[in-house]
Amino acid sequence: MAAHLSYGRVNLNILREAARKELREFLDKCAGSKAIVWDEYLTGPFGLIAQYSLLKEHEVEKMFTLKSGRLPPADVKNIIFFVRPRLELMDIIADNVLSEDKMHSPREFHILFVPRRSMLCEQRLKEQCVLGSFNNIDEYILDLIPYDGDLLSMEYESAFRECYLENDQTSLFHTAKGLMTLQALYGTIPQIFGKGDCARHVANMMLRMKREFAGTQNQILPVFDTLLLLDRNVDLLTPLATQLTYEGLIDEIYGINNGYVKLPPEKFSQKKQGEASKDLPIESKKLQLNSAEELYGEIRDKNFNAVGAALSKKAKVISAAFEERHNAKTVGEIKQFVSQLPHMQAARSSLANHTSIAELIKDITTSEAFFDKLTVEQEFMTGVDTDKVNTYIEDCIAQKDPLIKILRLVCMQSVCNNGLKQKVLDFYKREILQTYGFEHILTLNNLEKGGLLKPQTGSRNNHPTIRKTLKLWMEDANEQNPNDISYVYSGYAPLSIRLTQVLARPGWRSIEEVLKMLPGPHFEERQTLPSGLHKKRQQGENRTTLVFFLGGVTYAEIAALRFLSQMEDSGMEYVVATTKLINGTTWMKSLMDRPESQTA
Amino acid sequence: MGISLGVLTIFSLISGRSKGRNSFHFTELPCESSVRLITPELRKIKSDNKANVGEFSPDDAVHKLLLGKVVVLENFRSLKDKLLLLDFSVNAHDGNVITAVLIYLKRTLSKELLFRELGCRQTALRHFIRYLTETKELTLLMELLRSLGRTEEVSLLQYKDHLNIADINKRRDFLKSCVSLPFSADDSAHVQHHLALLERQIQIEVSDREAERGGQTDVFQKFPREAPVLHMPLINTLYYSCLYHYTEPQENYSSPLNIRNTFRVSEKQFFITALAARSKLGAWLDVDTMFTNRKWFGFTKKKSPIGFHRVVDILHRSSAPSQVLQKYIGLVDDTERRISLAQRHKCHDVVINTYRELRDRQLLLGYRGRVEPGSEQEVTIDRLLGNTQIRWKN
């Protein structure tokens, strides 16, 4: 049982348990002692499903990382490869198998493909003459991974690129499958809304898959009332902007991967009184971030400017709690105090960690560079001077700032202007190619294909109308005690979330005109429930909507949805699902060709 | 050692593969008999199970593949059957099945025929492109794209390959072969520039390496090259040129002006690059001549394409001496910025002059304590404070 998954309205532990059960069954299929050879990329997501203890229960004695050459020695009966279906990994596996010393202790080989088997991979193994060496070849369908009580992700990094650049809808098929799995566990979702071409496609597949099982009725009482499918390209602006929530900033600056963040160690080293300071640790400090940590749950979604006050308040509470020891007089009272100690110590340690993190972030957010960048972002978002070459961007290029920073800004300008004037676009392109290298014409082409950086087509710039109708820019957003979702970007309300908000109340019919200005169709579908399963809603009981972002979602958007869930009169609670958790930088990287050579 | 191509999933019901497994969540799990009720097609499969060798339709074959069974596709010889296989597999949405059929068609159909048929089947086409990309069959992929008229894409794909060539001469030759490809007009110009840049870098590198070894050229001795100029982006090449070839005439391919003109570098970029390079060498006179002097009611005022505070920043990074810094700090327009920069770099004269400009006696008085007692600056301050002709505002 993962504590952080049971807090929400929907118990995502059920999903996790189902995944664990499957894993157990596979492990038991390969009877006897085993060693697992891991595709490194999978260790993160798997860590969210099962720890080593579960594996040990099923006779996993050793674990290795997948690499070429001969496998390390291990006195086990079975060797199981846990891999993604990628051709280059097949070559490594073949190398491992062929290098095996068959004379001494012959071992049985198995492969578990995650999340799906691949014909191409099996063919490659056949070509390498090792396909016959495997006893079991199975797939472990890990579509939606629960990250927190209200958050699911497929961690399908290339989904946006595949859908919008390559017109490849494989990821959407997996999405539909993942949603069918979800419905099998949590009940058929009676209402489906969507906006975007991909959304339409996923809905179609879901309905069709349901039809294929006409005859068997899902008897589970529906947990979700509504499913909202949103294409990322309906709102290209939001991921480009710098997130301003605590969690959003941690992700932007340090990167959160599989619920963990790696931080520079200096601030976290323990220095005891009187002891000479040891050498600073070289390894980064790794912290797990989820709602099981009480303090983190409280501050993660706040605007960063409100975090300081929250930490101070918490410090006072914790201090007071520790002071209580002076008041404990009777044995009973002392006993009670002592029993609380672990919890209090954990709270204090948590406070120390987050105070350090907040300090690290503050160094950046109070810098002139950060302020200048934010100013330009907000100018674009409010439609100021989006039709000219921006001096700040020009200067950043001249200073050779990181390319991704430049790309985010020029794409923002393009999106906010519905495409750039040819002269302006040509100027930016030339400056970028001359400063960072001509090979970046590949990336620039990708960005154009994805609609992020393109020339004006002649059609009107609808952005101001969309902005006004949906109230995307809220002057004087209250960062400390927000009353609107725009606090997550200190004034800008994410378009995707605004659409979600309006859907719940008063409904999309009120914004028909604006919806037509956004790409892709919008639609509503209903799935019939077996009679008797229709929910009788109690007075004041909230409805639950699953919002699925096709192409990625940012932590700021998640924070905005949580804000909506908490609002007094919203009547709605949100659970978020996505193909991938993204920020502007990781998103941009996925659109570049050969990103390793292009981050300078 | 047999291969068990078992499909493990408790959600097999949803995935269409009926290998009914018991799951703790299903109160009603379809057993073998109820599977028959689910889809008529699956019902047919049961009867077909015995006939592994017998004739079955493309439809059946696809269904078998969906169930993870081994199917001998070679039985389907006619074009009609092959296309049916393709269409049924596309309808089923299962990527592995589509790939299996495509592999078969690739092997047994002529290129032209395959390309033609794929041309009118968008989903299958995308799958095939994906397949060729994954298996890195670039030649065939480019042929396919060309046949579809997606010529710009082909050009970019081919161009992309240059990243795999490390040797600059070979890369240059490769780019030469790319230049005539049907890029968009825009990209065509960029690729040509890319080629021109590489050619130029190769030439410069050859002659500079010689000069370096020869030991006659001063600048190479005083500021040894940190790296060859090869593979650098254009602006870096320009910087290099400003370092080592600044005074050369415009006709020389290694001169900054030649580079600027050939590649149409913007005025700002050129200025900043030249400024940074000459500062690095401590060539303050060169720096001075970069600013055009504008005559303004008898005063000569220096003009700069970038703000003077940025000029100061660039100079400072090259450890410019304070007399040099001072000159340019004094030219910063915004007085607040000017003062803060002057204070940071301890250019007292600028601060004093600015306070005088602002006619702010209080600030000037306050600043007196910041200069060395008995220094020239102190004397100046006292003189100014005592000057009755200045109309102080406070």
Image (tube, rainbow, N blue to C red):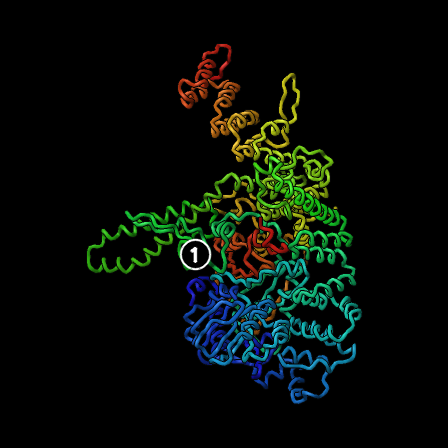
Residue drawn at the location 24% of the way across and 53% of the way down: A325
The one of A384 and A407 positioned closer to us in this rendering: A407
Which quadrant of the figure has residue B131?
bottom right
Question: Could you tell me residue A356's position as x and y percent?
Answer: 40, 48
> Residue reaching furthest bottom?
B50
Quarter of the image with the N terminus of chain B in it: bottom right
Q: Is residue B341 left or right of residue A126?
A: left
Residue pointed to by mark 1: A286
What residue is at 75 percent from the left and 62 percent from the top?
B145
Q: Position of residue A563 (x, y in %)?
A: 49, 53
Q: Can you see residue A159? A: yes
Q: Is residue B248 above or below residue B11?
A: above
Q: Nearer the viewer, residue A87 or A416?
A: A87
**Which chain does the residue under circle 1 lie in?**
A
Q: What kind of element bears circle 1?
A: strand
| Residue A513 visible from this viewpoint | no
Quadrant of the rendered image containing residue A553: bottom right
In-image side of B361 versus A325 (left or right): right
Name of the residue lying farthest toward the left: A330
**Which residue is located at x 64 percent, y 61 percent?**
A162
